[in-house]
Structure formats: C-alpha cells, structure tokens
Image (tube, rainbow, N blue to C red):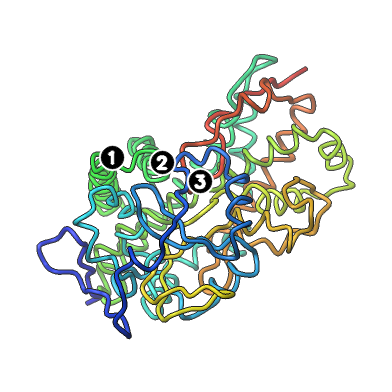
Amino acid sequence: MAARAVPPFADGAPRPFQPPLPRPAWRTTVTDRIALDPLGADIAAESARLRTLGPIVPVELPGGIPAWAPTRYDTLKELILDPRVSRDPRLHWRLWPELGAHPSWAWILGWVGVVNMLSTYGADHARLRRLVAPSFTHRRTEAMRPRVEAVTAELLDALGGDEAVDLKERFAHPLPMRIICELFGVPDALREDTVRLVAAIMDTSDPTPEHAASVQRQIGTVLPALIAHKSAHPGDDMTTELIRVRDEDGDRLSEEELLYTLLLVIGAGFETTVNLIGNAVVALLRRPEQLAAVRSGKIGWDAVVDETLRAHPSIASLPLRFAVDDLTVGDVRIPAGDAIITTYAAAGLDPDHYGPDADTFDATRAADDHLSFGIGVHRCIGAPLARLEALTALPALFDRFPDLRLETGDAGLRQVPSFIAFGWQEIPVRLRG
C-alpha cells in the first residue's frame, strides 16, 4: 500500500527533517528577509526590486514563512533541474514539524500539505505522474480539439452586441473550466464549488487560520463528493480511471493521493489557462500595433502565447521546493531543509536573459524557452491542452470581434489577490467599437 503522509496537525508525529550537520535555527541564519506582497499588486515591480539584491534573495511569504526567491532565469532553471532540490516537505522541509506552532502558516497546507505530483519527490513523483500523464499526451489533446472549438464557438455566440462585458467571466474562465470538468467528469452540481475551492487556494491575501481552515473544509467536502459521484456513476473520464486504479491496485494510488491528485490536475487545468487567455487578450489590446501584426499573419499566435507565458505567466511564484543538501547560488549558501519558491515571473522578466526590454510585452521576441510550464521531470503535463485552448480561443475571439477594446484604462484592471496567480479579477471590454 502506498505510504500515507502524516500532516502536521494529525495525532501522529510527522517525520522530522534531519539536517546533515547541526546548525543554528532558521531565525539566526538570515537577518533580513523581504516580505512578499500577499496581494501581488505589482508582481513585475517586486521582481525587479528583488533582482537588485542578487540572484537569490531571502524572503517571507504571507504569514511570515521563510523562503528563498530566485530572481534570475538561469538561477531558477538550475534549481528546477537540480536533483538536490525536492518538492516533498515531509522529507526535506526543516520547518514541516513546526507548522502546527504557527497558525499563520496554515494556508501553505493547501500547497504543500497535499500528496500529489506537486509535493512528492523521486519515485513517488514518477509513479503519480505516470498515472495522469496518459490523459494529456499530444495525441489525446489533439482528439479534444473539436470539443474545444465547439465550446469556444458556443461562448462567443452567447456574448452580446456592443455592450461592455467581463471577458474573463464570459469567455476566458468558462472555456477551460468546462473542458477540464468534462475531462474529469465533474458534474454540473459540483462545478461552482470546485471553482470556489481553487480560487480560495490561490488567494494569498488572507493568511489567517480561519481562511486556511475554510480551504481545508472545502477540500474535504468537494473532492470526496466528486469521488463518491463518479464511484456511483462511472464514465469515460479521468476521475473514473483514477478510481479504478485505486480500487484495483492500491500500491499505485492511495485514497489520499487520489483526492489530492484530482485537486491538482483539475485546479491547475483551468485556473492557469484562464489567466493565459486573459493575460494575452489584455496584452494585445494594450498594444494595437502588435495585435494588427498578429491578425495580418506577420506574428503567429504561438508567439503570442509564448510571450504571454514569459511576460505574464499564469503562475507568478509557486510554493514550495526544498534544499535536500546545502546548496550554493553565487556566493549565497542555501542550507539543507530551507524552502525555495519557484519564481516564474522573475525568470521571465530577467533582462540578463531576455534583454533590457524584458519588462515589455513583444510578441516578435523569441520566448519559447520560457519556464512557465516548468522543465524536466516537473514540466506541466497539461501544457499541450493549455496551448490548444489558448490557440483556439484567441484567434476565434479576435476574428469574431475585430473591434474589441478594453473598457477601462490600466488603472481599472485589478490583479487577483495573490502572489501566486498572475491574472486579472475582471477584464471589462466593449465587443464592438
């Protein structure tokens, strides 16, 4: 049977991290940490400020959680590919046993207190990835193209005339949400609850124990309801397949892993694509000359998607990874057991890699080496589906509404309340001039 992880608030004691050598507690390791803005109000500016302090900077996440933030493309890429960097907090985070003593840290459990591909290491990660990856191959994704095109057309048909609409609510959000829910057999009755759960996990503006408890209650309600529904009503969907694996071969997938794998793949499967589509629309509407070049065929839609993922990645920073051994980044020592955030936005905006205009959206730029889908063994398995949805939605939208324009200036667009997600709360547009 697959080993069950022990969360820090369970009756059983968690496995403590054992450092290779004695050393002072974390509070004496670094004297000055930069507190990240929990609202993510200006992620690009914050990334630029951190970059002036070095290639990797000691920071505090909401609630005071200590971590390290890579600020440069090469630094982040090296750490992602380094086998001495883990995603398993139970094995490799020195502060894992202390979570229960810090109520303001409890929000991080929605990210590291789970047991799925996002929080496992080595053989466990490979095992879980093998179970899900077949549903997201290029061949399987291509087979979904007709359905993606049909839902796109349906949503565009439902948009009104020349009135202002929230394009996120009416188009960018429902397209990937419907596709991923169909792929995993999420019934209509559970879809809004699923959306609220994912939004609550992404929201880092409230690191209170109450918010963290609310997230855990939602996880413990929505996902078991989905599993129960699909157990009673199996279908041709990924949830049914994972339930079959659990029931027939518990050594491959435990009950806990089933629940948290569904949380990861369903949540990541629509929320990140929502931001990809929305960020691309806003970037092009702010730069009509680039939009004209795209619509004339001088710039390809693939280039638009890559540049969006570079300059405005759907996930700005992803918690958490952990140093398995002592690491050296430049002249900075990262002690074994310390936490590291995966800073996709900082990497994408790094002028050392993308040039002095790295903070400018330019769809003519060669940006297909962005890290926003990850790299190596942790590359996002849903990347082909996300690209298919964006490459279907964007040209269809601008073909249907060639005079589309933003209804508000830059000051009227509000970033979602998160240092993790990089996207807009609403995208008010006028469909026709």
| Precedes in sequence: disc 3 or disc 2 | 2
Which amino acid does the dot numbered 2 rest on? Answer: Asp
* Image x and y of residue 244, in percent: 31, 65
Query: Residue 91 appears in which quarter of the rendering?
Result: bottom left
Percent position of residue 3, x then y: 23, 75
In the image, what residue occupies the spot 74% across and 40% down? 395
Point out the tag, 1 or 3, that comes first from the N-terminus: 1
Residue 243 in percent (x, y) is at 30, 62
Labelled disc at residue 264: none
Q: Tell me if mark 1 has few (under 14), some (14-19) or many (20+) residues whose alpha carbon lies within 10 angstroms of its own.
A: some
Question: Foreground residue, 204 or 216?
Answer: 204
**Distance in Å between CA atoms under marks 1 and 3:** 17 Å
Can the viewer see residue 229 in this picture? no
Identify the amino acid type marked 3: Ala
- Asked if the residues shown at circle 3 and circle 2 are in contact, with their CB atoms under 8 angstroms apart, the answer is no
- Badge 2, how many Cα within 10 Å: few under 14, some, many 20+? many
The disc placed on residue 421 is 3
What amino acid is found at the position of numbered circle 1 in the picture?
A: His
Residue 146, placed above or below residue 396: below
Per the image, label 1 sits on a secondary structure element best described as helix
Question: Mark 2 and mark 1 in contact (Cβ < 8 Å)?
Answer: yes
Q: Earlier in the sequence, mark 1 or mark 2?
A: 2
Residue bearing the label numbered 1: 211
